[in-house]
Amino acid sequence: MILAIALIYFAVLIVGAGLITMRQVKSSGDFTTGTGTGGMSWIVVCTTFVLIPLGSGHSMSLWEMATVGGMGAGALLWAIAVGAIFLPIMMLFLGPIARNTGYKTFPEITKAMYGRAFGWFHAAVSTSSMSGIIAAELIGTGVAIYTLSGGALSLTPAIIIAFIFALLYIFFGGILQMAWINIVNSIMLIIGSFAAVAGTVIWVTKNVANGMDGIMDYYKNSDMGGGYLNQYTNALQPTTILSIIIPVALMHLCAIAVSQGHNIPFFAAKSNKAIRKGVYLAGVINAMSAVPWVLIGVIAFALPAVMSTIAPEEVGKLIVPAAALMMLPKPLTGLLMISLLSATLSTAGSITLGSAQLMTTNIIKDALFPKMSDKHELLLTRVMCIVYLLVCLFMALNLPVIMPVFFFCFMLNIPLFFCYITGMFITINKVTCNLTLIAGYIVAFWWTFVPPANVPYPFNDTTWAVIAVSFIFGFLLPIILKKQGKMSLNQMIKVSRGQAEARIAD
């Protein structure tokens, strides 16, 4: 019953929003950036952008880190700290900068810096590096559907259903469809997850000796200690800060800053003010959305009744769904899983849309069919949504095989980020750009698949190592060789606009 209710909710919301917004989609630009609408308002930009990073990484990963990962309540601080670094930089700084260029995709920006071939390369790398994230979102969505079925569906058909919903999320109306769905889902995300926390506490109070005090006693008397329930004890350890919080924040920033899917709301914004105005609301949603998953996971981890229902190797993935099935009334279980679906589907939809846009516009059209009509470009973009999601579905159904490749691909955007930042603000130097890519990718491959021994901490971690070489070759070296490069893209844009204004004045 709760599965049917949840699926009907999303079917009505997704198809309804799609049918309404499809009437406004007259061109490929309308589909990918809402060109014909005059731009997205601040509330739409805010809710669209803030839900994009809140996928399985902000739900499943959190409860997994809190439980089998050993961080306890510290996982909450980790999530909030990453959001506190990532969101303001993107919304106050990098988002408006990307919009100011006047381009509609990131490969168009890097193409203006380093040439046509580099734009194609950026589009190809971006789509491949984001595919692992979509695979994870399909699995997260599948877990929610599995839970809603009460375990009646196995994970494989649940993931296939997730594929269908992720496709429908953006297939009809593109960015406009996703934007209006995300406004509703941002509300459902907070209401559903916090209502589930309240239901969990009520169940514990009625069914566990000493209620919530009994949960605290469990941790105090275990090897984990009472600090497991303190968000600062584990999270503020130097090793945690250097090995998890900072590298995860940097990896998010570097990978997402040049990702088309995450930046679609910024390209579609009405103005820079529309991007910046919602930063406080986005921060609140980001922080609040992390709390319920950690709380429910930590409570369930202390209950043998819940733990006994899950295979040991599945605890990290299924502990919150198992807790929901045992503790919550069916309506609350439905609300909680709708919250999870709201997060995972928004991420999957936006990245699919962004990747389909890059494959269509920046690779197929730009490289092969430059005279392609807008009508065919719109049709091809929808086809590429299907193709891209099918590839990610295969990865999701074979995740143990592709996990090493996933982390390797995620590293690929980091050197691109330094090439972008340097070319935007310092100088455009193709030699240092190529050196950055070569050095960064060698280290990413080496550290991922054949980790070297005796590397000093923290550079034994792949993220730190790739960031270090990318910083040296992509930032420091261009500063040293600045006179041997061209002026930055930002300077070029200012000069170009100044000359246009002068011509108008004349």
Image (tube, rainbow, N blue to C red):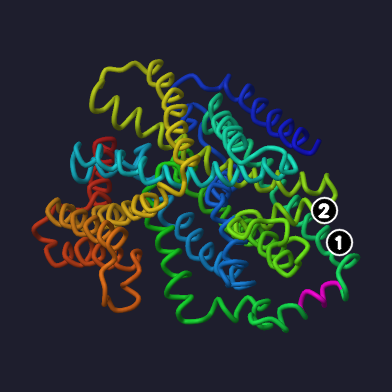
| Residue 274 colored in magenta in the image | no
Q: Examine the structure image and report whether residue 212 is included in the region drawn in magenta.
A: yes
Quarter of the view holding residue 305: bottom right
Say whether residue 395 is left or right of residue 455: right
Which of these two is toward me, 191 or 42?
191
- Give the Cα distance between marks 2 and 1: 7 Å
Which residue sits at x=60%, y=25%? Answer: 21
Name which of mark 2 and mark 1 comes first in the sequence: 1
Identify the residue at image location x=36%, y=50%: 405
Q: Is residue 157 above or below residue 437?
A: above
Q: Main secondary structure of the magenta part?
A: helix
Are discs 2 and 1 less than 8 Å apart at CB?
yes
- Which residues, given as a range, are shown in magenta? 211-216
Query: Which residue type carries mark 2?
Result: Leu
Q: Position of residue 225 (x, y in %)?
A: 66, 83
Which residue does the numbered mark 2 point to in the structure image?
A: 328
- Residue at label 1? 203
Q: At numbered mark 1, what does the secondary structure look like: helix, strand or loop?
A: helix
For the point 77% across and 80% down, the residue is 217
For the point 72% across and 56% down, the residue is 309
User: Does residue 343 appear to the left or right of 332 in the view shown?
Assistant: left
Q: Nearer the viewer, residue 401 or 296?
A: 401
Amino acid carrying mark 1 in the image? Trp
- In screen coordinates, is 137 left or right of 246? right
